[in-house]
Image (cartoon, grey):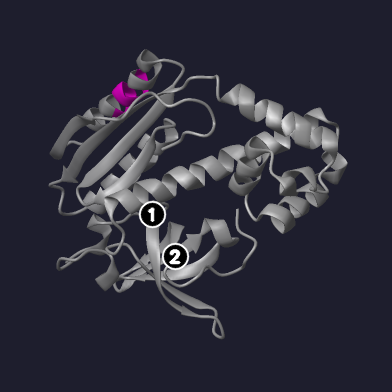
Amino acid sequence: MEDNKLPRQGSLVIAVVSKITNFGAYCKLIEYGDTEAFLPIREVSSGWIKNIREYIHDGQKLVCYVHSLDKDKGTIDISLKRVSTKDSKDKIRSYNLEKRLAALFSQVVRKEKEVKNKDELISLVIQEFGTYTNLMEAALGDTPEFGKSRLPKKVRELFVKELEQSRKQKRYYVSYIATISTYNTESGATELRSLMKEIRDTGVDLGYLGAPKYRLFAEGKDYTDAEAKISKVRGIVESKLKKGVFEIEKEKLKKEKEGIMETI
């Protein structure tokens, strides 16, 4: 959750590709009210790029680095090649955590029958804590700032209760590194875009690691549930990719994550 209309130079942002040209791609920064940013072709990959559509696709979600910002003109240039795999993974983790906490807060607001005051309460969270993640840390740490918050006492108490309950609920995660490429020289880009959309529609997170590498990430109530989602993606790719390469290898994760505070 961001209160500013523009990101800071040097920060990492979540960008969704909205329009691809021969010189780069226009993207929407979803943390900043869909503010437009431009991804120059030279910032997509370190190597020479013949066809930009072999590296990025319409609607693709990317973690990018803000390397140029003109506040007077309101223009933003972003880079994909300057983001490491670790930085990308950490950014996605924090973004997903923020989304989950925002959903949890909305759930608390509904339970406390404060829906009519929802916008006002969200505004208070922004003013006092900046992000839901900061609110969570203050709540679990029972800090003076949390105790003095203007958020209704019942909302604060239920938020803490829901956080503590979520920590007890285990979720299971699996991650795979997939190589996906096509030999189709005529409509390969269109084929891949369609394929990526079908993968995302299954609920599996699709992360771009640099063509032709992707990360497939799924979660479930148990490992069987999570693996079933990956199997569905495997079936889709094998049936849709007529001429190309599809290889998939399981990525070792640390341990099963628990609750809302642990996301990838």
Give the side of residue 34 with respect to residue 203, left or right: right
Q: Position of residue 23 (x, y in %)?
A: 30, 74
For mark 1, give the secondary structure.
strand
Q: Residue at x 42, y 52 (%)?
A: 59
Work out how far the residue at label 2 is from the one at label 1, CA to CA, in angstroms: 14 Å
- In this view, the residue in front, 195 or 231, is 231
Q: Residues within 10 Å of mark 1 (few under 14, many from 20)?
A: many
Q: Position of residue 225 (x, y in %)?
A: 40, 16
**100 falls in the magenta region:** no
Q: Magenta segment, which residues?
A: 228-233
Q: Give the amino acid at mark 2.
A: Ser
**Of the residues under marks 2 and 1, which one precedes in the sequence?**
2
What residue would you read off at disc 1?
A: 62
Q: Are circles 2 and 1 on residues that touch, CB within 8 Å? A: no
Residue 82 sits above or below residue 264 on the image = below
- Quarter holding residue 10: bottom left
